[in-house]
Amino acid sequence: MPLDYQRIKNWPFVDTRHRYTQRDSILYAVGIGLGSDPLDPFHLQFVYEKQLQAFPTMSSILCYPGFWMQDPATGINWVKLVHGEQRSTWHKPLAAEGVLTGKTHISHVIDKGPDKGALVVAERNMYDEDNTLVATIQQTTFCRADGGFGNGDATLAALPSMPQRRPDHQRRIPVAPNAAIVYRLNADPNPLHIDPQVATAAGFERPILHGLSTYGHVARAIVQDCCDNDPARLYRFDVRFSAPVYPGETLLCDIWQEGSAQIHFQARVKERNVTVLSHGYAALRRNP
């Protein structure tokens, strides 16, 4: 059934104030695999309160407005939703603890046509207590059962394709068997990520990893290999989700560098040779 364009485009979000602590930053870092090597200084800066730093992609769970598409008033068939893309821009480094205010609005409602679904893009801007813009998050949701309403917004600018050459380097990223159990303590308690019966009913052989945990795992590779281990250099990080990851698998992240400030990347599961993140693009701040 088609969704109501005007209702979704003008959905009344309430500003979200989020106070987070150093403990929250550490728990998020552990949820994306940081700390797996307790002797590595790169890992320790995100999991040890001594000179603690927040990993940038933690912004994806801050000031979250809730699962608003589950509200019956949206008219959206939320059971058939798929997280399509995630795009993040950091206007300043994320502090290890603090208070942020999130302001969310719907920037795009795109009709793919009858029986082809719709894309809904929610944009969240987060401000610190000085009212300085810290981060902008764009989350694209593919509403598979809600297309055909017509007169929607123009298509969101497409993410770039991968260069037609061999990657400049590759990073192997093991995903811990309990990665989903840890990550769900951050923000997403969906039983799909812990209950084998729920996962089987959804068509998976076992519980899957959260897409945003995969997002964070792969961002680690970009910070390590392209940012000299400095998270403050990551300015943009955009991806398309193409397949789920099972905890315990191994990610292979292929990385292409375009000059000193632009990165293309994709990630696949080694064991199944399945691409799980595609059209990856990162922009970096230059070294001072």
Image (cartoon, helix red, strand yellow):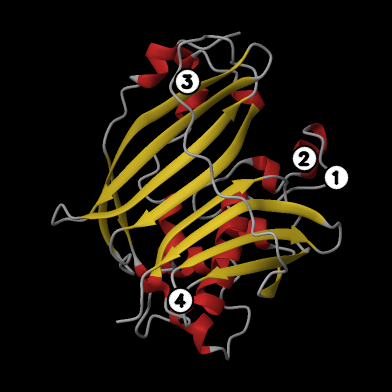
Q: For marks 1 and 2, give the CA distance.
A: 7 Å
Q: Residue furthest bottom?
A: 39
* 225 in relation to 267, above or below: below
Mark 2 or mark 4, which is nearer to you? 4
Is 275 left, or right, of 4 in this rendering? Answer: right
Q: Which mark sits nearer the N-terminus, 2 or 4?
A: 4
**Does the residue at mark 2 contact the one at mark 3 (Cβ under 8 Å)?**
no
Is the residue marked by circle 1 packed among few (<14), some (14-19), or many (20+) residues within 10 Å? few
Q: Residue at x 30, y 67 (%)?
A: 95
Q: Residue at x 81, y 47 (%)?
A: 206
**Does the residue at mark 1 contact the one at mark 2 (Cβ under 8 Å)?**
yes
Amino acid found under the numbered disc labelled 1: Glu
Q: Which mark is residue 71?
A: 3
Q: Position of residue 114 (x, y in %)?
A: 64, 11
Is the residue marked by circle 3 packed among few (<14), some (14-19), or many (20+) residues within 10 Å? few
Is the residue marked by circle 4 packed among few (<14), some (14-19), or many (20+) residues within 10 Å? many
Q: Quadrant of the N terminus?
A: top right
Q: For marks 4 and 3, give the CA distance.
A: 36 Å
Q: Secondary structure at mark 2?
A: helix
Q: Which mark is residue 46?
A: 4
Q: Position of residue 145 (x, y in %)?
A: 64, 17
Q: Secondary structure at mark 4?
A: helix
